[in-house]
């Protein structure tokens, strides 16, 4: 017992004298895992992108050759273009629907019964796993028996064969993604709307402002930080889209839905062109980094972090 | 006219909700429809009878229960691990002084938004070397030290009054004592919020799990669904019943914790967007 006490007090005294070390000790478990499984692989990925990988003959340093090959590869350029196209479709849909839902629930939620239920229904798809979302929409878009096809037939409009027509496949996947994710944005925007002081609207109402004016002059400016933040994060997540595409179209028809992450996956794990795949990962990384920096600049995030 | 005006909000809201829930209902219905009803033109809205044959076939031909368990283990490991290491680190960043602290924090933050896709290839080779490929640990480890956790928890810890720490220290608490007696009890809501976020994240993670988990016995639910889909492209009864069964746990948890989940997102939205 006595022994124990001395050890403990010695330890306390040691820690007290070396408080600088104590702080590091607390960070250590996180830093170790983070270093090994997050930071190091990113660095190693950049390193790998400079080599031609060959498990039998040994890898060969090729410098930037992989990148040159990448930008000469029609398939990669197509994947890059598809990634941008997908983001251009999915991001406005996700944010637009999220904002629309948030405004709807915010303006009517307090007076209408069942708003909580509506919110729950709109939010729920977010909790589904990407595989479920893909299966759901593949079935919805089925050219013979899908509900969307039936709906078109009922309206006597010729139904596009959504997932097997090159022009329609990517928009269809973007739509499914919006169904999946816009509920999450809705909740974020609802929180932002809730923070706007009620008095502003009361004053505006006394001045006879219509909803359009309130929206343009109160809601949009005050919601701007939340909107910009969501915009950056949604673009980044759109750039990383993988599961929906793999499961709904496998990149087809043709290569009309092959996005960057899917290209990386095929190149690395189907064709084992490790260097080239790593290089395409670095391109994805660079794009994300640029966007993050733009976001930081736009949002003045830096001051918030200090 | 006024009557219509009063009803319009309800109409719009419920119409929207109805449109949004259709895909889920359609999948749930398909899961219990007999095959002739699934593949009928015109569609049979009301199935001639309900069948559990697809679900029986699902459990007979796939280790579906095993997948559920794997997902549960993975998500629990990640959640517990992440809460543990992030809490310690966030406490240090928020409350302890040490040289290089702010630089270290910024370095971690830079990685907050970096895509995992960059690192899957190195991770794959790493897991082979560590003999962790095709194990739940290999799938879980890269998800534990998420910078977002440290960021979120630190932000919250900063808002806990410092006077509480000082009082505890005067009473003889060590740093660990302050963490356990002051910080943790005051941060339960944010632990709940982040815990739910990270659990959902791990439960749904697809890209790395698909690469890391190889044998049908080892995979998690999202990857398992991919296996089924790859095996029977057109067996919609089976595949929708799998999708339905896979979303059942989320639905049940959501029905119980709805308010908490949504409030948790609102709570962390200032940070995560």
Image (cartoon, coloured by chain):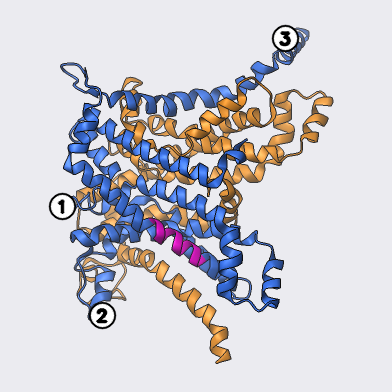
Mark nearer the N terminus (3 vs 1): 3
Mark 1–mark 2 distance (CA, rounded to whole Å): 30 Å
Q: Position of residue A255 (x, y in %)?
A: 18, 50
Q: Are marks 1 and 2 in contact (CB under 8 Å)?
A: no
- The quadrant in which residue B57 appears is bottom left
Mark 3–mark 2 distance (CA, rounded to whole Å): 81 Å
- B256 up-or-down from B37: above or below: above
The mark lying in front, picked from 3 and 2, is 2
Image quarter hosting the N terminus of chain B: bottom right
Residue that mark 2 sits on: A154
* Element type where label 2 sits in the image: helix
Residue that mark 3 sits on: A7
Main secondary-structure element of the magenta-colored stretch? helix
Disc 1 packing (10 Å; few <14; some 14–19; many ≥20)? few
Disc 2 packing (10 Å; few <14; some 14–19; many ≥20)? few
Residue at horizontal 19%, vertical 36%?
A: A270
Give left or right: position of A80 versus A108.
left
Is residue A92 a member of the stretch shown in magenta?
yes
Q: Which chain is blue?
A: A
Per the rendered image, the range of residues in magenta is A91-101
Mark nearer the N terminus (3 vs 2): 3
Residue that mark 1 sits on: A254
Q: Nearer the viewer, residue A240 or B216?
A: A240
Give left or right: position of A54 versus B125.
left
Q: Which chain is orange?
A: B
């Amino acid at each position: 017992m006595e022994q124990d006490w001395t050890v403990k007090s010695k330890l306390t005294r040691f820690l007290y004298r070396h408080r600088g070390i104590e702080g590091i000790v607390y960070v250590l478990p996180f830093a170790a895992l983070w270093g090994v499984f997050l930071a190091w692989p990113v660095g190693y990925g950049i390193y790998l992108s400079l080599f031609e990988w060959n498990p039998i003959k040994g890898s060969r340093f090729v410098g930037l050759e992989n990148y040159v090959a990448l930008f000469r590869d029609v398939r990669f350029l197509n994947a890059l273009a598809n990634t941008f196209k997908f983001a251009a479709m999915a991001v406005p849909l996700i944010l637009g629907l999220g904002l629309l839902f948030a405004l709807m629930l915010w303006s009517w939620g307090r007076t209408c019964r069942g708003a909580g239920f509506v919110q729950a229904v709109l939010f729920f798809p977010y909790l589904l796993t990407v595989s479920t979302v893909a299966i759901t929409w593949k079935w919805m878009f089925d050219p013979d028996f899908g509900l969307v096809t039936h709906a078109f037939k009922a309206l006597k409009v010729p139904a596009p064969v959504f997932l097997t027509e090159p022009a329609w496949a990517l928009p269809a996947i973007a739509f499914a993604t919006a169904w999946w994710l816009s509920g999450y944005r809705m909740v974020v925007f609802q929180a932002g709307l809730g923070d706007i002081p009620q008095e502003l609207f009361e004053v505006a109402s006394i001045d006879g402002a219509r909803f359009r004016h309130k929206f343009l002059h109160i809601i949009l400016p005050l919601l701007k930080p939340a909107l910009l933040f969501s915009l950056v994060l949604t673009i980044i997540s759109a750039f990383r889209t993988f599961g929906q595409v793999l499961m709904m179209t496998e990149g087809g028809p043709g290569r009309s839905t092959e996005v960057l992450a899917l290209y990386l996956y095929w190149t690395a794990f189907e064709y084992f062109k490790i260097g080239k795949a790593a290089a395409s990962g670095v391109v994805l990384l660079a794009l994300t980094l640029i966007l993050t920096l733009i976001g930081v600049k736009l949002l003045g995030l830096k001051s918030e972090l200090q | 006219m006024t009557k219509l005006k009063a009803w319009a909000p309800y109409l719009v809201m419920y119409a929207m909700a109805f449109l949004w829930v259709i895909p889920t209902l359609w999948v749930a219905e398909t899961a219990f429809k007999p095959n002739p009803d699934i593949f009928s033109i015109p569609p049979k809205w009301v199935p001639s009878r309900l069948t559990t044959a697809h679900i029986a076939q699902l459990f007979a031909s796939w280790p579906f229960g095993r997948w559920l368990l794997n997902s549960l283990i993975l998500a629990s490991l990640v959640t517990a691990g992440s809460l543990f290491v992030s809490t310690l680190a966030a406490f240090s960043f928020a409350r302890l002084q040490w040289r290089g602290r702010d630089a270290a924090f910024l370095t971690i933050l830079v990685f907050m938004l970096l895509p995992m896709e960059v690192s899957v290839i190195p991770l794959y080779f790493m897991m082979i070397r560590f003999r962790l490929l095709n194990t739940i640990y290999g799938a879980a480890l890269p998800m534990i030290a998420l910078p977002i956790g440290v960021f979120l928890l630190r932000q919250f810890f900063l808002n806990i009054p410092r006077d509480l720490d000082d009082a505890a220290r005067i009473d003889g608490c060590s740093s660990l004592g302050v963490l356990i007696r002051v910080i943790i009890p005051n941060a339960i809501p944010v632990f709940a919020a982040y815990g739910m976020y990270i659990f959902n994240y791990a439960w749904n993670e697809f890209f790395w799990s698909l690469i890391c988990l190889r044998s049908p016995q080892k995979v998690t639910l999202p990857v398992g669904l991919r296996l089924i889909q790859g095996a029977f492209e057109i067996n919609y009864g089976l595949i929708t019943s799998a999708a339905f069964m896979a979303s059942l746990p989320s639905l049940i948890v959501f029905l119980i914790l709805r308010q908490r989940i949504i409030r948790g997102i609102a709570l962390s939205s200032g940070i995560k967007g």
